[in-house]
């Protein structure tokens, strides 16, 4: 009984210690190491934007955002910084072109192509539950998912993960 | 200069308390090596910590931005009161406050006359060792006197959410509660070394009450603050940080009841010790969960993994020491024969429910952490889990609370008992019918819980009535119990009203538009820009009418704090005994004529705060009582 109690005690402490090493804000995606979902949507420029555009390009970033989402505005400068080292694609969720264009004009666009997702269907396919969310895609496979705005402190992770090998 | 002196005092605390710590460790190897007067050490470290705290406070008041904490958490524009409360509005300062409270409790205990000198010495040896662990934590991982050079000319501002009188006093109260349990732990562990003589119960008793009162007030104040400041329209969210404070409260409440039996009947002595140690362990666990950031919480504290490891070490060593001491003494839990229908039986029942509640809430709170480590899966446990486990436990709990006070010590008979309270049972029927008649349209669960809440209040009042009938003055002890139980009853009514019966309206409201909620007409008159001392505010103006007559103007605000670029919501509340009309204002719509407004009607919310007040008063009466009966 005594030993059992002590073992249990140390087990709990061990779990708490292990828990310390983990980031509770990290939300893994079911898509990690899997192929990206197929899609074909209209882009802001009116062209066709499909999953093929994200494949065969090495490492790319896909960012779900909207002009109506204040945290997206917060992560915008970081995206602009990242756009210098890696191509960034955007999907604007439930966003009208007339709202999106002035927003991009004001802040500048880090995006190569922006896909429009007027009814939020693409966000559901990708398992996005809040904005902004960002995926790092390598050769058509999802490598990393980031939930919430990319802050100054997250840039290191992004820079490391998008480094060309 | 002053801040350097503060650091010197802190270092002195470390050095001097280390003597106690060294002896505590060493006495296990060689018990008669050196004898120390721990009373003197206690007095010294209290004095040094106090001086250190005063110098930190002074640095905050004069806005000495050369100190990192001051530069990050204060601002020269800040109103003086918030410069002062800013001392504990950050991690470093609040842990220093923690230490101050800890040494203060030691100091008070050293002045406590009822214990023998030897026992006092033993208790303070442990208490000082606890202080040593905390002060080394402060100096090595979170030193409030850390400087930077060159230092900024202006500070970063105190988090605007903390710039509020409610929050200014909430942490000190919570700490007085949390840390108060440290002395309970010290007394219990010292009692273990002493061979568990019964007299320690009398020494322990007032400390249990005083810590419990402070924790009750602390939790109450925190929830009151969340209610009117966060603008979410609720008072309890089952957030890990809230649960962390509830856990020691529950075990302390169990302890509160047990210790009465232990004092009177000299049974449950070991159980008292277990509860005391457990309560302090849970306080520390709470601190760990809150400060290390292992769980996702709405409370954003500054988190730092090294600090997390240190607090875990603190938690592990203190709980290990407690458990080790208990097991090492090899006390067998004595078998006590008690019947269920007796005062002892009812209090045991209370303990069983309190502890099962503690255990389930603990599991719900840390399960996400275990799941993420063991199964690598991400889950979150939210309010529905806690609400659904709370409900079934509540029924027997309330039943015990009603019957308990009417049972006799020793052995009682159910039939005789029911006969004794037959008038009360009749009253229950009438109350239930009345509650049902007044609320028949509302969900059945709310009717049940409001009725149960009323039952508790009534049965407590009935107790008083019995004494008056017999022309006896209500004994102080009983009066305290009655007051606290009425508090619980009111709390149940308030919580039920403001959760199940809540009405909510969220909409874009045009200027001039009137909305109906409950029996109020809420007309939106417009938005004013107001400038505060360190913020700009958008103040919505709402006219509240009842049957066409204006009864009040409500002014909810959305404040933009200049320095930190942060936004806070200040809800406006019209309180009455039947419920609160609660308005929060959001953003303006694109067409500039409509605003998001959130209007709630929260029935009976005021009874929650009144309930907490009753609870604390009941506790205070017991405390005074336990002091005077020495």
Image (tube, rainbow, N blue to C red):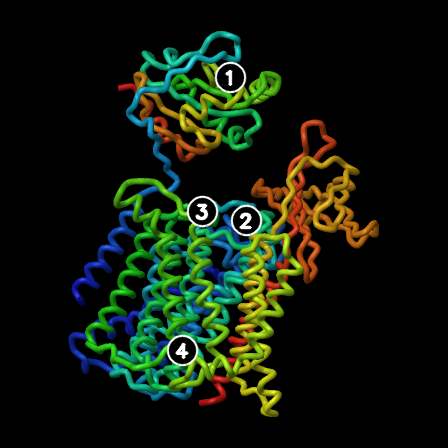
Give coordinates of residue B145: x percent, y percent: 43, 57
Q: Is residue A7 above or below residue B323?
A: above
In the displayed structure image, the side of residue B383 where residue B184 appears, left or right: left
Q: CA distance from mark 2 to mark 1?
A: 38 Å
Marked residue chain, label 4:
B
Residues at marks 3 and 1 on the same chain: no
> What residue appears at the point 72 percent right and 43 percent down from the top-left corner?
B540
State whether discs 4 and 1 lie on one chain: no
Q: Whole-percent x and y of residue B25?
A: 22, 71
Q: Nearer the viewer, mark 2 or mark 1?
A: 1
How crowded pointer 2 is (Cα within 10 Å; few <14, some 14-19, many 20+) is rated as many
Work out whether residue B33 or residue A47 is closer to the camera in this orientation and state it.
A47
Q: In what element is the residue under mark 4?
A: helix
| Alpha-carbon span between mark 4 and mark 3 | 35 Å
- Left or right: A86, with B568 as reference point: left
Chain letter for mark 1: A
| Residue that mark 4 sits on | B43
Q: Residues within 10 Å of mark 4 (few under 14, many from 20)?
A: some
Q: Quadrant of residue B9?
A: bottom left
Q: Residue B159 shows which numbered tag?
A: 2
Label of residue B149 in the image: 3
Q: Mark 1 = which residue?
A: A116
Circle nearer the viewer, 4 or 2: 2
**Going from the N terminus, do you reach mark 4 or mark 3 first?**
4
Q: Does label 2 or label 3 sit earlier along the sequence?
A: 3
SS of the residue under disc 1:
strand
């Amino acid at each position: 009984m005594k030993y059992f109690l002590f073992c249990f005690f140390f087990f709990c402490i061990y779990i708490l210690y292990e828990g310390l090493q983990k980031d509770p804000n990290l939300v893994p995606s079911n898509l990690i190491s899997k192929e990206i979902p197929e899609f074909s949507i209209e882009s802001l420029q009116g062209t066709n934007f499909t999953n093929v555009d994200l494949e065969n390009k090495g490492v790319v970033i896909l960012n779900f955002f909207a002009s109506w989402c204040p945290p997206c505005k917060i992560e915008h400068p970081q995206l602009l910084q990242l756009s210098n080292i890696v191509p960034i694609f955007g999907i604007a969720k439930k966003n009208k072109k007339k709202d999106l264009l002035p927003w991009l004009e004001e802040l500048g666009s880090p995006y190569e192509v922006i896909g429009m997702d007027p009814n939020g269907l693409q966000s559901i396919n990708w398992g996005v539950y809040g904005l902004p969310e960002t995926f790092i895609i390598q050769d058509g496979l999802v490598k990393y998912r980031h939930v919430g705005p990319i802050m100054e402190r997250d840039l290191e992770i992004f820079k490391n993960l998008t480094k060309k090998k | 200069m002053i801040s350097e002196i503060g650091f010197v005092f802190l270092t002195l605390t470390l050095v001097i308390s280390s003597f106690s710590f060294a002896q505590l460790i060493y006495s296990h190897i060689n018990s008669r090596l050196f004898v120390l007067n721990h009373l003197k050490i206690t007095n010294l470290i209290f004095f040094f910590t106090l001086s250190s705290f005063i110098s930190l406070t002074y640095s905050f008041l004069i806005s000495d931005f050369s100190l990192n904490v001051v530069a990050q958490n204060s601002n020269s524009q800040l109103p003086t009161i918030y410069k002062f409360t800013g001392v504990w509005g950050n991690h470093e300062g609040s842990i220093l406050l923690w230490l101050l409270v800890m040494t203060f409790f030691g100091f008070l205990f050293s002045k406590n006359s009822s214990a023998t000198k030897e026992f006092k010495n033993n208790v303070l040896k442990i208490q000082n060792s606890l202080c040593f662990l905390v002060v080394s934590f402060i100096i090595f991982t979170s030193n409030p006197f850390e400087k930077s050079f060159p230092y900024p000319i202006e500070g970063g501002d105190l988090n605007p959410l903390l710039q509020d009188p409610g929050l200014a006093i909430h942490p000190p109260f919570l700490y007085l509660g949390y840390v108060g349990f440290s002395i309970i732990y010290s007394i219990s562990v010292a009692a273990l070394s002493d061979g568990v003589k019964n007299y320690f119960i009398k020494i322990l008793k007032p400390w249990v009450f005083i810590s419990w009162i402070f924790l009750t007030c602390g939790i109450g104040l925190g929830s009151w603050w969340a209610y009117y400041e966060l603008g979410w329209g609720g008072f309890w969210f089952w957030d890990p940080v809230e649960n962390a404070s509830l856990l020691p409260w529950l075990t302390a409440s169990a302890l509160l009841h047990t210790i009465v039996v232990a004092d009177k009947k000299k049974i449950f002595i070991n159980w008292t010790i277990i509860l005391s140690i457990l309560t302090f362990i849970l306080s520390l666990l709470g601190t760990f969960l809150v400060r290390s950031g292992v769980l996702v919480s709405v409370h954003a504290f500054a988190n730092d993994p090294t600090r997390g490891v240190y607090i875990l070490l603190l938690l592990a060593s203190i709980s290990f020491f407690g458990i080790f001491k208990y097991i090492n003494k090899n006390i067998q839990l004595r078998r006590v024969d008690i019947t269920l229908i007796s005062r002892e039986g009812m209090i045991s029942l209370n303990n069983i429910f309190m502890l099962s509640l503690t255990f389930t809430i603990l599991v719900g709170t840390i399960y996400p952490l275990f799941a993420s480590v063991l199964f690598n899966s991400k889950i979150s446990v939210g309010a529905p889990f806690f609400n659904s486990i709370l409900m079934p436990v509540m029924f027997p709990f309330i039943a015990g609370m009603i019957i308990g006070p009417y049972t006799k010590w020793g052995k009682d008979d159910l039939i005789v008992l029911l006969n004794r309270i037959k008038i009360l049972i009749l009253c229950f029927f009438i109350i239930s019918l009345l509650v049902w008649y007044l609320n028949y349209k509302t969900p059945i669960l709310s009717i049940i819980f409001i009725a149960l809440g009323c039952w508790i209040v009534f049965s407590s009042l009935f107790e008083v009535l019995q004494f008056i009938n017999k022309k006896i003055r209500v004994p102080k002890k009983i009066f305290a119990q009655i007051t606290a139980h009425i508090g619980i009853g009111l709390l149940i009514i308030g919580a039920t009203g403001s959760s199940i019966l809540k009405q909510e309206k969220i909409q874009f409201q045009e200027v001039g538009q009137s909305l109906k909620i409950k029996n109020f007409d809420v007309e939106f008159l417009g938005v004013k820009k107001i400038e505060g001392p360190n913020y700009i505010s958008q103040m919505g103006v709402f006219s509240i009418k009842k049957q066409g007559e204006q009864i009040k103007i409500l002014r909810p605000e959305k404040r933009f704090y200049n320095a930190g670029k942060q936004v806070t919501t200040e809800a406006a509340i019209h309180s009455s005994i039947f419920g609160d009309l609660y308005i929060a204002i959001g953003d303006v719509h694109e067409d500039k004529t409509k605003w998001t407004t959130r209007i709630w009607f929260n029935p009976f919310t005021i009874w929650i705060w009144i309930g907490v007040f009753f609870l604390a008063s009941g506790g205070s009466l017991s405390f005074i009582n336990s002091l005077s009966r020495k």
